[in-house]
Image (spheres, grey):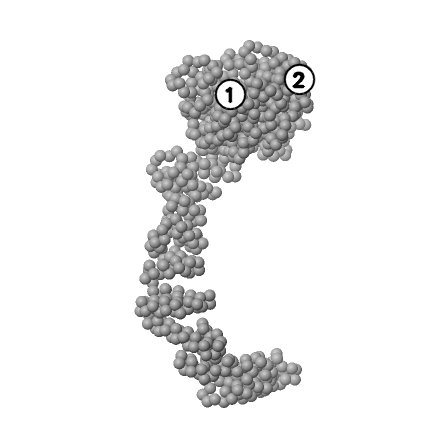
């Protein structure tokens, strides 16, 4: 096995190796030829877009318009479309698997991987006017950007194609300008900004956002007469490679300060087609049918191919695409090298040998175990890690068996790393299948993250695989996958609305964190009105249902849902929205069918729009409510100038409602208003708007006793109320002599307790005592207590044998009286 594995290896320097192995036999049509086609592919096992290369003369088959075909990394056809939108300057892929096509007018057209046009944006008016001659598409883990070069050698840049907030113009590089185009240029992307390295003759200029002028990179190419021919930056944007027309290759840091290597490069005919980085360890130059690999020190190897190849830069390798296969070239990972290297004595290598001997039931297994015993844990981890870097399933299995064997021999070894790698390997093997076409390495998966992988699978519509993997990998939340599937189902389905909605409901069931509102929103966005209504029915939360129903203009269905929810705030919100969207008359007629909604609507109008409330009552012939509304407005102090008119309106409404008693009361109130005006004219003080009670009291206050008596008689004010008013007014005016005279009138309807109360209110105890003998017997204890006459109160309570009253008095008494009261209590208790 070691010989077979290392047969793919090539020594790279003193102790490092590179390996090249086939991942896929390409499944695309036999007429595909890289000699006549232009390819673009994305990192992380990205899709491949293929179009006829206009720079090459080829025999045209079919129509004259170019066709852009999209394949997965294994060459499995996905989609295609006819390009009829002008000359393409550059194509590339976004991190969301969208194909970006840059035209010479600066327009960027975006298609999804299934050839559906998404949208487009421009790189600005200036770029449109002076035309684009080249473009670069650059990526970070979170975003994709575009930079374009115009005929005037100016560069315009967009940092994020998902949110084109601003097109930035970079500073111009010094030089003749139009007559001296850059020999090479590349984008260096950082966290929040991007800059361009712009090569002109032997100089490399750094054009940064926000800077007014370009700066020169301090790069010493070792030849003053050379010209920069190509630039390449590593995937982490930390390393730079420079190729000159004199055959010099400079490798160093992206700021140009650190130089790792300068070497000579062989020149062949034709010129090189690509220069790119293999991870951060080596630079690869593609000469068409051969690849030269240069390390950071003195390492060098070369690979030959039968046909022309196209290379794709990855974070830890390169993918090499030919007419017939897709190969992967990478530096051999350290643990793989240590285990399988010839004559290796690493712990992992010895553990693998022990495992093989154990499988053969050989005693030599124990010998190898003794060699590795001191480093058994390290050996186990080496085998687990090495398995992660293998594409061959059988090699993975052998390494994991070795790890399992070593783990059993350890006294205390957590199975977590082993179990995790088993799951990750099954995941990697599943997505590497040609039908899926995601040839990710272990390092790429670690960078992409499992969540990022799920996003890729969803975008590629492998929803069921994503669900299976999420379940197998114990990922906490798979609801996003189900939601994405449901939205895709909504977008693509042309079946019966009820059938589609029911299928989505059956598949999702009561899945947590999946809102049918989101799915219905997607249906609405796709113009599928009926499907959106059907889906929103499955949403259990009314507060999520109603906004979408209102967007769908299903106002009364939304109203019904709000009423069923019992949430009056929702009902008010629907009523407010609906009232603004349809005519008032139609709205008022429609809500008759919803008694609760109508009641809330009327309540709202009562507080905020009384004119509208009157219109509703008039339309409904609700004369009683109209009258009551007029009465309420009449009682409002702010309507003092219209009280008469409001009373007349109330009187008429009560008449129409055949409520004669209420109409008569309105008449009496109008008479009172008239009487109050006469009083104002006569007494020159305000009476209008007062109640009958207040009017009588005010007359008593101003000493108009006869007028008060007359008003009392005319409006049949009860004797008890009138006496209360007389006593209250005399007490407030401290007319205690008149109060005493008044108390001697015959037929007292309220007793003498109020006389005591008004005297006490003015702290006139002597006056109050005058009325104590006339207080009713059952209240004497209470009123004697009010005046502080506790001994007399106790005696009265004892005489009346009122045990409860004595108990209430006890805490109020001084010690001597308390003893006497306690004696009364004991006596009565016998």
Please give left or right for residue 368 compared with residue 683 in the image.
right
Q: CA distance from mark 2 to mark 1?
A: 38 Å
Number of callouts: 2
Which one is nearer the viewer's eye here, 703 or 46? 703
Which one is nearer the viewer's eye here, 31 or 197? 197
Please give left or right for residue 116 compared with residue 188 in the image.
left
* Residue at horizontal 32 percent and vertical 67 percent from the top: 657
Which one is nearer the viewer's eye here, 476 or 41? 41
* Residue at horizontal 67 percent and vertical 14 percent from the top: 223
Q: Quadrant of the C terminus?
A: bottom right
Q: Position of residue 328 (x, y in %)?
A: 54, 20
Closer to the observer: label 2 or label 1?
2
- Quarter of the image where one finds residue 261: top right
Position above or below: 731 against 629: below
| One can see residue 343 in this view | no
| One can see residue 553 in this view | yes
Q: Which mark is residue 23?
A: 1
Q: Position of residue 531 (x, y in %)?
A: 37, 40
* Residue at horizontal 59 percent and vertical 11 percent from the top: 267
* Residue at horizontal 46 percent and vertical 67 percent from the top: 637
Label 2 crowd bin: few (<14), some (14–19), many (20+), radius 10 Å: many
Sequence-wise first label, 2 or 1: 1
Q: Residue furthest top?
A: 269
Q: Position of residue 559 (x, y in %)?
A: 39, 51
- Quarter of the image where one finds residue 829: bottom right
Q: Position of residue 105 (x, y in %)?
A: 48, 25
Tell me the residue that label 2 is attached to.
221
């Amino acid at each position: 096995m070691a010989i077979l594995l290392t047969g793919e290896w090539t020594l790279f320097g003193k102790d490092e190796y590179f390996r090249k192995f086939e991942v896929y036999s390409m499944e695309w049509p036999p007429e595909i030829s890289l000699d006549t086609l232009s390819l673009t592919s994305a990192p992380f096992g990205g899709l491949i877009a293929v179009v006829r290369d206009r720079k090459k003369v080829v025999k045209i088959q079919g129509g004259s318009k170019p066709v852009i075909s999209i394949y997965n990394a294994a060459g499995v056809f996905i989609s295609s479309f006819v390009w009829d939108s002008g000359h393409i300057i550059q194509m590339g892929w976004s991190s969301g698997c969208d194909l970006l096509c840059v035209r010479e007018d600066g327009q960027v057209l975006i298609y999804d991987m299934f050839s559906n046009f998404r949208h487009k944006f421009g790189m600005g008016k200036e770029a449109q006017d002076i035309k684009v001659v080249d473009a670069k598409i650059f990526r970070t883990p979170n975003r994709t950007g575009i930079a374009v070069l115009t005929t005037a050698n100016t560069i315009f840049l967009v940092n994020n194609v998902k949110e084109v907030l601003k097109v930035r113009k970079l500073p111009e590089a010094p030089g003749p300008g139009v007559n001296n185009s850059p020999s090479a240029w590349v984008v260096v992307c950082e966290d929040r900004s991007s800059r361009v390295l712009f090569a002109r003759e032997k100089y490399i200029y750094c054009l940064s956002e926000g800077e007014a002028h370009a700066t020169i990179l301090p790069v010493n190419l070792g030849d003053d007469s050379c010209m920069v021919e190509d630039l390449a930056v590593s995937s982490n944007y930390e390393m730079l490679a420079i190729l000159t027309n004199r055959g010099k290759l400079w490798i160093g840091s992206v700021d140009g300060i650190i130089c790792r290597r300068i070497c000579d490069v062989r020149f062949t005919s034709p010129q090189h087609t690509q220069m790119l980085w293999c991870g951060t360890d080596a630079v690869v130059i593609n000469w068409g049918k051969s690849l030269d690999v240069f390390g950071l020190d003195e390492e060098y190897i070369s690979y030959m191919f039968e046909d022309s190849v196209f290379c794709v830069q990855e974070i830890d390798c390169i993918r090499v695409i030919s007419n017939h296969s897709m190969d992967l070239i990478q530096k051999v990972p350290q643990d793989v090298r240590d285990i399988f290297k010839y004559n290796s004595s690493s712990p992992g290598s010895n553990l693998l040998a022990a495992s093989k001997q154990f499988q053969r039931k050989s005693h030599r297994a124990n010998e190898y175990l003794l060699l590795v015993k001191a480093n058994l844990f390290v050996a186990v981890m080496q085998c687990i890690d090495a398995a992660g870097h293998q594409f061959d399933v059988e090699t993975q299995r052998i390494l994991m068996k070795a790890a399992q064997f070593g783990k059993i021999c350890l006294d205390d070894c957590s199975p977590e790393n082993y179990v995790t790698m088993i799951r990750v390997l099954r995941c990697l093997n599943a997505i590497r299948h040609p039908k899926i076409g995601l040839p990710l390495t272990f390092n790429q998966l670690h960078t992409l993250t499992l969540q990022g992988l799920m996003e890729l699978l969803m975008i590629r519509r492998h929803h069921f695989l994503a669900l299976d993997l999420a379940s197998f990998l114990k990922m906490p939340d798979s609801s996003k996958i189900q939601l994405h599937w449901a939205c895709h189902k909504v977008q693509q389905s042309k079946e019966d609305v009820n059938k589609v909605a029911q299928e989505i409901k059956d598949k999702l069931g009561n899945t947590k964190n999946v809102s049918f509102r989101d799915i219905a929103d997607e249906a609405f966005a796709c113009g599928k009105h009926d499907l959106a209504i059907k889906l929103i029915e499955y949403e259990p939360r009314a507060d999520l249902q109603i906004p979408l129903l209102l967007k769908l203009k299903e106002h009364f269905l939304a109203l019904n849902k709000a009423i069923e929810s019992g949430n009056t705030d929702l009902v008010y919100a629907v009523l407010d929205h609906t009232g603004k969207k349809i005519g008032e008359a139609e709205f008022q007629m429609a809500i008759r069918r919803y008694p609760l909604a109508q009641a809330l609507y009327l309540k709202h109008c009562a507080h905020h729009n009384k004119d509208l409330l009157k219109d509703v009552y008039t339309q409904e012939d609700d004369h009683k409510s109209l009258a009551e509304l007029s009465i309420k407005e009449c009682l409002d102090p702010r309507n003092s100038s219209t009280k008469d008119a409001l009373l007349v309106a109330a009187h008429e409404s009560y008449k129409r409602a055949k409520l004669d008693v209420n109409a008569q009361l309105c008449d009496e109130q109008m008479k009172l208003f008239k009487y109050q005006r006469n009083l104002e004219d006569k007494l020159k003080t305000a009476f209008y708007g007062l109640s009958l009670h207040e009017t009588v009291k005010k007359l008593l206050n101003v000493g108009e006793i006869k007028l008060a008596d007359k008003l009392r008689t005319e409006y049949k004010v009860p004797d008890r109320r009138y006496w209360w008013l007389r006593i209250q007014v005399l007490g407030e005016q401290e007319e205690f002599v008149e109060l005493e005279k008044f108390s001697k009138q015959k037929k007292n309807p309220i007793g003498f307790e109020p006389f005591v109360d008004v005297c006490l209110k003015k702290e006139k105890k002597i006056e109050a005592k005058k009325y104590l003998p006339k207080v009713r017997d059952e209240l004497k204890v209470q009123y004697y207590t009010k005046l502080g006459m506790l001994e007399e109160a106790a005696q009265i309570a004892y005489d009346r044998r009122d045990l409860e009253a004595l108990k209430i008095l006890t805490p109020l008494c001084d010690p001597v009286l308390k003893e006497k009261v306690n004696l009364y209590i004991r006596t009565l208790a016998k």
